[in-house]
Image: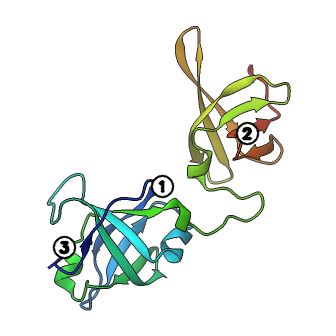
Amino acid sequence: MLSGLEAAELPADAIEVGRIADAWGIKGWFKVLPYSASPEALFSSKRWYLLPTEKGVKTFAGTLKLVIKEAKEHSDTVVATAQDVDDRSAAEALRGARIFIARSSFPTAEKDEYYWVDLIGLNVINREGIALGSVKELLSTGAQTVLVMGYEQDGKPQERMIPFVAAYVDDVDLAARRITVDWQPDY
């Protein structure tokens, strides 16, 4: 069923962006569950890299490269079709596969827009130069995004949260791997 797909090496800058949920229709289309509410990377990249599901039935091993013919939004998900995935059986064999895309294939972010993955690991300092921690993750609260930073105090790991909004974030310098904020350590 997966004989036409080529084995590949996962790119060094690969980012996991979703997983394949199931077959969609009878002509080889499949349903994708994106990890982002704005899955532009799925639409911009024509090369997706698949790793087998971490649990459940594994229908392939290693890394496969899918050459995407078309990907589009459908209801609350994304549907796609790829070369060498010609029927429902081939699409079903991909069920559960984890989708990775090279970060270099992501569309260019607009001014003052950032991909969350680019913010992970950045050091956060305030206007006075006091280190507040490094970004561990980001949370979407609906109204805004929140930076979750890790730091140590008295040898114990701690967390600090700062809203990722213009009122508190002065500058994001991806090259210097630093975010400057208007925030104090005791807030």
Secondary structure beneath dot 2 equals: strand
Q: How far apart are marks 3 and 1 (CA)?
A: 26 Å
Q: Which amino acid does label 2 sit on?
A: Ile
The residue that appears at 33% across and 75% down in the rendered structure is 66
**Residue at 44% in and 57% down:** 14
**Image coords of residue 6 (percent x, y):** 25, 73
Q: In this view, does 100 lie above or below 158?
A: below
Q: Position of residue 47 (x, y in %)?
A: 42, 73
Q: Which of marks 2 and 1 is in front?
A: 1
Image quadrant containing the N terminus: bottom left
Q: Are marks 3 and 2 in contact (CB under 8 Å)?
A: no
Report whether 172 appears left or right of 87: right
* C-alpha span from label 3 to label 2: 43 Å
| Residue in the picture at 21% in, 85% down | 88
Answer with mark 2 or mark 1, whichever residue precedes in sequence: 1
Question: Viewed as shown, does residue 96 lie left or right of 173?
Answer: left
Specify the quadrant that holds the C terminus.
top right
Give the amino acid at mark 3.
Ala
Residue located 26% across and 83% down the image? 85
Mark 2 and mark 1 residues within 8 Å of each other at the beta carbon: no
Q: Name the residue under label 3.
A: 93
In the picture, the disc for residue 179 is: 2
Furthest residue in direction top, as rendered: 154
> What numbered label is drawn on residue 13?
1
Left or right of 50? Residue 153 is right
Residue neighbourhood size for the residue with mark 3, other residues' Cα within 10 Å, grouped as few (<14), some (14–19), many (≥20):
some
Say which amino acid is labelled 1.
Asp
168, above or below 38, in the image: above
Q: Which of 116 and 4 is in front in this view?
A: 4
Residue 183, compared with residue 101, is above or below; it is above
Image coordinates for residue 15, horizontal then vertical, percent:
46, 56
